[in-house]
Amino acid sequence: MSENNKEQLLHLVFGGELDDIDHVNFRNLDKLDIVGIFPNYESARLAWKSKAQQTVDNAHMRYFIVHMHKLLDPDGDGKFG
């Protein structure tokens, strides 16, 4: 099966500086770092880990993985709507 024909479980990796490390409230939405959209969790996790390690000295910087496939298909039936 080719890469284009495999089931895509899209994941978004992004991050930014938080106002407070106990809550997810970003200091400046204009400065969010959109790392990218990845076809599976494994590749998204590698990107997340790389970015998190690059910013380890900034306690307020956080990166997240969003399971876009769950937002696009909340029922998990492969259909929209």
Image: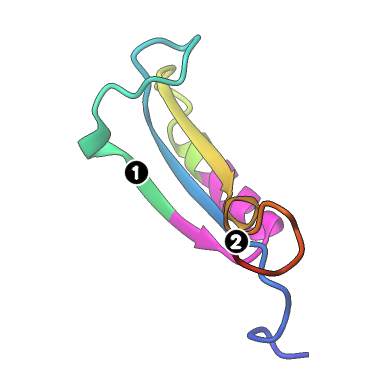
Percent x, y of residue 23: 47, 13
Q: Amino acid at mark 1?
A: Asp
Residue that numbered label 2 is attached to = 10
**Is 42 in the magenta?**
yes
Residue contact at pointers 2 and 1, CB within 8 angstroms:
no
* Residue at left offset 34%, top offset 43%: 33
User: How crowded is the residue under tag 1: few (<14 C-alpha within 10 Å), some, or many (20+)?
Assistant: some
Give the prevailing secondary structure in the magenta stretch. helix
Query: What residue is at 49 percent from the left and 35 percent from the top?
Result: 63
Image quadrant containing the C terminus? bottom right
Query: Which mark is nearer the camera, 2 or 1?
Result: 2
Residue 52: x and y in percent read: 51, 36
Could you tell me which residue is drawn at 65 percent across and 58 percent down? 73
Question: Which residues fall within the magenta stretch?
Answer: 36-50
- Of residues 41 and 76, the one nearer the viewer is 76
Amino acid type at mark 2: Leu
Q: Is residue 29 left or right of residue 35?
A: left
Of helix, strand and loop, which one carries label 1? Answer: strand
Find out whether residue 79 is within the magenta segment: no
